[in-house]
Amino acid sequence: MMLHLLNRSPQFDGLYWDLSEAFGADDHLLLIEDACYAALPAAAASLAAFGGRVSVLSEDAESRGLLGRLSDDVALVDMAGFVALTATFPHSLSWF
Amino acid sequence: MMLHLLNRSPQFDGLYWDLSEAFGADDHLLLIEDACYAALPAAAASLAAFGGRVSVLSEDAESRGLLGRLSDDVALVDMAGFVALTATFPHSLSWF
Amino acid sequence: MQDDEAALAADTPIAPLDLLVILRHPPHGSSWLREGVDVALVAAAFGQSVGLLFQGDGVFALVEGQRAGPLGQKGTHAQLAMLEMYDIERLWVSASALRARGLTPADLMLPVQLLEADALERLVHAQPHTLLF
Amino acid sequence: MQDDEAALAADTPIAPLDLLVILRHPPHGSSWLREGVDVALVAAAFGQSVGLLFQGDGVFALVEGQRAGPLGQKGTHAQLAMLEMYDIERLWVSASALRARGLTPADLMLPVQLLEADALERLVHAQPHTLLF
Amino acid sequence: MLSYALLVHAAPYSEQGALSALRFAQAAVAQGHRVSSVFFYRDGVHNASTLMAPPQDEVHLAEGWRALAQEHGTELLVCIAASLRRGLMNAEEGVRHGREAHNLEPPFVLTGLGQLVDAMQANDRVITFAP
Amino acid sequence: MLSYALLVHAAPYSEQGALSALRFAQAAVAQGHRVSSVFFYRDGVHNASTLMAPPQDEVHLAEGWRALAQEHGTELLVCIAASLRRGLMNAEEGVRHGREAHNLEPPFVLTGLGQLVDAMQANDRVITFAP
């Protein structure tokens, strides 16, 4: 069980591909910083490999004006939830 | 007539796309730094929009071990040739 | 918010400006956009005619409803709201960049002119000075 | 140069190491790769078992025939040539990354083990500590 | 209650990563976790500069890190090799390199990559913040 | 013979862009062109640091820029707003900000973005080097 942190926009699709190669069935993906844009419905293809096991950091989505625009299957977590995810998952890996 | 400078690998395909939107019929593209990898035959699709009007900086290709591996339709220029290109073209634009 | 949503027609002439700034980076995640707009504002304050072209993730800078981030990260929306005060009124957006991100001009905080690739190429080639951020 | 070009079979067990370093950035254009390998070398010098996984543009670090750049930019090939001296002998390469770049193990300066996506996932999940550069 | 080490590669003000790391550290200690150490590497070393002078209406990152160290005992470890080439040095290195100035002071400490290796072993979690 | 201004966004040692810019400048003057000014912006400001201490077998970028200024009269302009937040200041700014040290000295000069605008008008070519 692994938590993957991602901070780049879907423009970096080579990065999303590399992450998908390492992503396991029990893993979770947290979108932070510019990766929030991957949670827009138009970017759904960039998250297809992660099968709904995706959250987005609410404060980063909010500052970007994205609240209310996000895909339904991406969960919102606040900074406390970010910390909680890192506590729940024994390992974290940051992709950038 | 414009000289476009590009320094990122073909992984940044959004960048190559944006450049292609701005690229004109009399323009030229010079690949420097990690953009040298775009001159590999396997990356030919990333240069398709630039119709053979592409050069690569030889010292950057050489340090990366790419001499002898490059596409035939990409010209090699040395650093003096880089300067000469910027002198020939009245405008230069760097993409990164 | 739009006074002109139409794409630039193929035969519309494009007047050269003193400076065109191309903005390709998304806001908030880095300071590229902010420091690019700073150059535009300073050039305008020096009396130059300045235009902005939003390409790639740069179009996200125009999304309506942005705010300062936690810890007071300022973002760029407040800066962009000042453009008119600096007489920077020519704002162009790559139509393909907007489409690819599922956005329309109605999602944007400022009126812009959409450019298809042909017009975008003509715009860039009409300018004596262009910087990209 | 290869002692084992075969992809890792689906049932091959993967032993955990003390540290796995994933290298995704190309050499020369930035110092990501060099500073990532530095971490691997220091961990190995401290007696840890260390493996390297090359993904994405990181596979370019292994291309044979690299040399120092102008102005003495060192690159990473000399560093990689020292791996064996530090007992870093487990070098994995994403098979898809290599294929996408038109490279084969014969183009590489060191013997590596190719990993298809399934095996790559198992490798990453078998490690207690992984850093990415 | 877990112990965390953070690894910060992101330059201050150029990218959000340094701010994200500071936010994360503050949230972690607020939840009762311990942030034992922050290791600054690559352009992240600039977070330690005593000469950082951001506009008054922006976060002062170096101050934020110092407050974390003072209030929660977090070690602020800065890679010495990454620092020297990028222009960060403490008083001792300033003397060694014949400079009249320095721009790194406690609680930031110049140290080697071995400390990063140690921090990975000694903590329950290692979280990386990058540009 | 043309006059050039260079715009450098790339941090020293982290990315190749700063080296590329220096190489280009040297090649341009070798061909008889004039490199009137180099403007350092964003993380490129770190090229100006007096505290840069790279390993002896690596290029010393700040030295390279200083040599260019001394031998060819190139102005080395460093954006003041970009510098202060990132921890670069000259003696005057050091005093103004109550610091005991500074890490930027002539021939590097702290200046505003207006000088970049001027340099674009005053030179035949402007070439950007980025990370």
Image (cartoon, coloured by chain):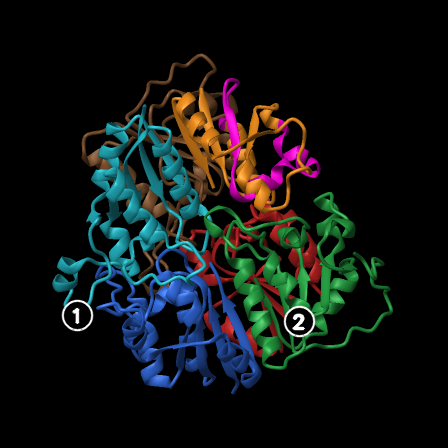
Chain colours: A red, B orange, C brown, D green, E blue, F cyan
Task: Using the rendered image, report if marks 2 and 1 lie on a common chain.
Answer: no
Residue type at mark 1 is Glu
SS at badge 1: loop
Q: Is residue F14 visible?
A: yes
Disc 2 from disc 1: Cα separation? 45 Å
Amino acid under disc 2: Met
Name the residue rendered at 32%, 83% in the picture.
Answer: E70
Q: Quadrant of residue D25?
A: bottom right
All told, the count of numbered labels is 2
What x and y, as percent, mark residue C5? 43, 27
Q: Position of residue D94 (x, y in %)?
A: 72, 56
Residue placed under numbered mark 2 in the picture: D85
**Would residue E19 be seen by someone viewing this image from the given angle?**
no
D11 magenta-colored: no
| Chain where mark 2 sits | D
> Magenta segment, which residues?
B22-48
Crowd rating for badge 1 (residues with CA inside 10 Å; few <14, some 14–19, many 20+)? few
Answer whether residue B33 is magenta in the image. yes
The percent coordinates of residue A44 (x first, y second) are 63, 49
Residue contact at pointers 2 and 1, CB within 8 angstroms: no
Residue D61's image quarter? Answer: bottom right
The mark lying in front, picked from 2 and 1, is 2
Q: Secondary structure at mark 2?
A: helix
For the point 76% across and 68% down, the residue is D122
Q: Residue under circle 1?
A: F100
Q: Quadrant of residue D42?
A: bottom right
